[in-house]
């Protein structure tokens, strides 16, 4: 067995210290393989390994070394090695450092000289910070071009900013770019590991209170309503299977199995609560989002207006149509007529989206056979007896 260098012995001592004194970080440190490398000036991670430059490690006081260990762990917790996409690699590194360094300070770790910190970035995600930095860069570049007349400013982004380490994109066992399925699996594994580490630390009374909130947001992210709407629609897509052409994967083995032709939603219904005052801005936002999703999934939408009764005309929209909804009604409130009308017309929707303020308790006696999504524009509401709720 190869003898550890002085630097890696220092890293091992740091991991041991975390295990005993700060078990949340210590447990997650054991998940990573810490290796010595001179290919990076400081350190870096790809979500599986942490690469440590021995000269840099030796230069750090022990408390700052603990900060570095936690710094690499947080990158992995937040999936920074999985989520860069097409964004600039260097600027993504900068944004990720700005996102996590305030968290480390709040956790009691000592700052490392020269690391990145901006007060206005506290509490922001790396994604949001990246967008802001990109706008700042583009504005700075434009101002530089104006100052130089027809000259073109260089493409160096914020040369005075240096990330503490390097986040490397995750790769598979062959060293190639990971697939979407592999990315989801790795993200899921890190969430499980984070939850387990938090449980162990909490049971020992060594999980800081503010970390409970951070971990809850990490494991149960509060997504924007558009993302939640898209998730609901995608869950209700179905694959249409046909035998012509057959599934090529199995033809060589002599099996003629159906192949997947497309992902479609089928027909769905939008119920619009027109009692009292309808939030027109919110309704227009929902209609615009549904129009985009209808075009994407090749879905047809039927719109039923209802206060305490269904009002004609019942509208129909198809992919490519301009979805323009003018609420009809203004009386009392009941949800029952929409469900009754669907049954009366013999409709078989894939699902129903109901746009409402949820200030009504007149629901059908029994839930329908199709999924229901209540899209609510009110801040406070009573949970309906069935279906899912998205709050705008």
Image (tube, rainbow, N blue to C red):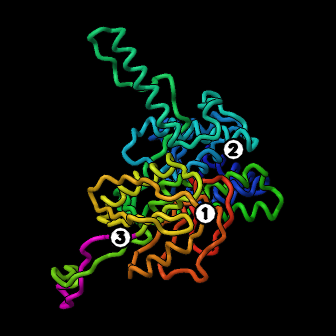
Few, some or many C-alpha atoms within 10 Å of disc 1 (few <14, some 14-19, many ≥20)? some
The residue positioned 36% from the left and 45% from the top of the image is 86
- Report the front residue among 255 and 386: 386
**In the visual, does 32 lie left or right of 304?**
right
Residue 77 shows up from this direction? no
Q: Nearer the viewer, residue 235 or 366?
A: 366
Which numbered disc, 2 or 1, marks the residue that appears first in the sequence? 2
Query: Can you say whether 93 is above or below 135 in the image?
Result: below
Q: Disc number at residue 265?
A: 3
- The percent coordinates of residue 249 (x first, y second) are 23, 80
Which of the two labelled residues, at mark 1 and mark 3, occupies the earlier sequence position? 3
Q: Dot 3: what SS? A: loop
The furthest residue to the bottom: 254
Label 1 SS: loop
Which residue has dot 2 on it? 66
Pointer 1 with pointer 3, Cβ within 8 A? no
Of tags 1 and 3, the one toward the viewer is: 1
Magenta segment boundaries in residue numbering: 251-268
Q: Is residue 73 left or right of residue 258?
A: right
Q: Which mark is residue 332?
A: 1
Residue 249 visible somewhere in the drawing:
yes
Residue 127 is situated, as x and y percent measured from the top left of the image, at 50, 43
* Location of the N terminus (image quadrant): bottom right
């Amino acid at each position: 067995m190869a003898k550890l260098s002085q630097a890696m012995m220092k890293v091992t001592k740091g991991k041991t210290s975390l295990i005993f004194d700060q078990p949340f970080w210590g447990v997650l440190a054991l998940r990573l393989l810490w290796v010595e490398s001179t290919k990076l000036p400081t350190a870096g991670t790809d979500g599986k390994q942490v690469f440590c430059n021995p000269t840099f490690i030796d230069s750090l006081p022990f408390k700052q070394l603990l900060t570095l260990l936690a710094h690499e762990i947080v990158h992995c917790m937040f999936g920074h090695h999985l989520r860069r996409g097409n964004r600039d690699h260097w600027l993504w590194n900068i944004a990720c450092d700005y996102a996590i360094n305030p968290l480390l300070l709040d956790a009691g770790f000592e700052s490392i000289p020269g690391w990145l910190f901006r007060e206005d970035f506290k509490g922001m995600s790396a994604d949001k910070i990246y967008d802001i930095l990109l706008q700042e860069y583009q504005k700075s570049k434009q101002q530089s071009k104006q100052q130089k007349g027809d000259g073109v400013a260089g493409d160096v982004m914020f040369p005075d900013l240096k990330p503490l380490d390097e986040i490397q994109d995750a790769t598979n066992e062959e060293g190639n770019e990971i697939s979407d399925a592999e990315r989801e699996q790795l993200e899921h594994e890190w969430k499980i590991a984070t939850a387990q580490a938090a449980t162990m630390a909490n049971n020992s009374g060594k999980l800081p209170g503010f970390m409970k909130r951070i971990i809850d947001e990490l494991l149960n992210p509060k997504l924007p309503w558009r993302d939640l709407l898209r998730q609901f629609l995608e869950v209700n897509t179905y694959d249409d299977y046909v035998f012509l052409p057959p599934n090529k994967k199995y033809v060589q083995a002599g099996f003629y199995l159906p192949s997947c032709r497309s992902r479609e939603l089928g027909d769905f219904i939008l119920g619009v609560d027109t009692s009292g005052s309808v939030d027109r801005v919110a309704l227009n936002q929902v209609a615009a989002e549904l129009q985009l999703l209808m075009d994407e999934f090749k879905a047809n939408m039927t719109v039923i207006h209802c206060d305490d009764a269904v009002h004609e005309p019942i509208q129909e929209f198809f992919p490519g149509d301009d979805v323009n909804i003018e609420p009809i009604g203004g009386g009392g409130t009941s949800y029952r007529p929409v469900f009754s009308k669907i049954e009366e017309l013999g409709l078989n929707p894939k699902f129903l989206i109901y746009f409402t303020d949820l200030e009504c308790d007149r629901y059908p006696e029994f839930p329908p056979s199709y999924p229901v999504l209540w899209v609510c524009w009110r801040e406070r509401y009573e949970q309906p007896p069935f279906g899912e709720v998205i709050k705008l």
